[in-house]
Amino acid sequence: MPLTTTTTQASIVTPEFILAARVAARGVSIFAPGGVGRTTPGILDVVDLRDKGTKVASWPIEDYHTAYNVAEGVDHTTSQSFAPTDNTATVSEIIAIETISKLAQRTSPDNSIARAQRMLGVAIGEKIDTDILALNTSLDTDVGTTGTNATFAMLSNGPTTLNAARYPGPYSGIIHGQQWYDLANQSTPTLTFPAGLHADKILSQFWVFEDVGGLARLIVNPRVPTANSAADRSGAIFSSFPCYGLAELWWGEVEQEIDASLRGTEIVITSCYGVVEIDGSAAVAFETDA
């Protein structure tokens, strides 16, 4: 009978390395699972699409009606129709890849596999923050002043504007480090020490402050986008109504592929999600600091 052999390839992607990737992602990302951006009311409504058999999530746009006073026995002339519409987000794959040669695996003084997965975790964590915060520049209202330093007066205009539009609190905000620098130089006695998970890492990536400028929570994040005009940074102030939608199919899965001809191993981390603006009036842009 013919001789058959079976070869198995031991995986270098161990649970410890996968955990390192996810910890790295959470250390730099406010919107990774468990991140402060997900737990802060009014920023995200997360829809889990696992086992739903679809790539699309939808959020209804409410068509509010107006009630009128009318005299008894008199038919009012204004008629209102109900036309339901939705905002939708379609998930797509997000991927980061690192190739490690066999030589590097066996000679690197640091563990090249662990280092690669930390780097990939950071990449995927930064990507989701960048995609969500990019929506700040399309919000319906702006309470900042382009080309000028951020001030607490401008910041407090956020809750005031949202309250006048009947969007309730608690209010929260996400601003750029340049905008925070302006506020800190204006009035340092009003600031409190930042708090959060993995304090050493967070202090170099993002800060979380409580009760600043009329906001229940203020997050300082370096991935706040540049606004459409000049180099202004477009932070945002949020009401308690979800402003953005996040459709998610999976998060931060780590795999490996072998390329024998290149004598290398590809470490691959993937996520699958989509983002959409649900209600541009539920938050206001905070564009300052050219």
Image: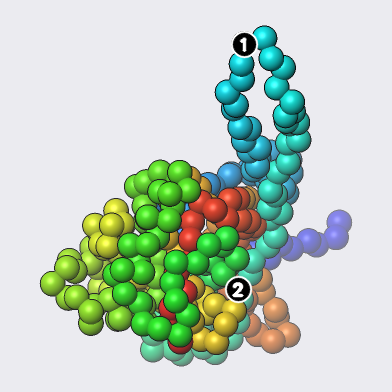
Relative to residue 37, is residue 259 depicted above or below?
below
Q: Earlier in the sequence, mark 2 or mark 1?
A: 1
Camera-side residue: 36 or 111? 36
Can you give x and y, in whole percent of width and height, for residue 255 in the image? Answer: 60, 64
- Which residue is denoted by mark 2 in the rendering? 96
Can you give x and y, in whole percent of width and height, for residue 256 in the image? Answer: 61, 68
Q: Is mark 2 on a helix, strand or loop?
A: strand
- Which residue is denoted by mark 1 in the rendering? 72
Residue 260, by quadrant, is bottom right
**Residue at position x 40%, y 60% in the image:** 158
Can you give x and y, in whole percent of width and height, for residue 34 in the image? Answer: 40, 53
Q: Is residue 24 visible?
A: no
Q: Can residue 228 be seen in this view?
A: yes
Residue 157, by quadrant, is bottom left
Can you give x and y, in whole percent of width and height, for residue 262 in the image? Answer: 69, 87
Tell me: 182 left or right of 137: left
CA neighbours of label 1 inside 10 A, class few (<14), some (14 to 19), many (20+): few
State yes or no: discs 2 and 1 in contact (Cβ < 8 Å). Answer: no
Task: Residue at the far left: name it.
Answer: 189
The type of residue carrying mark 1 is Glu
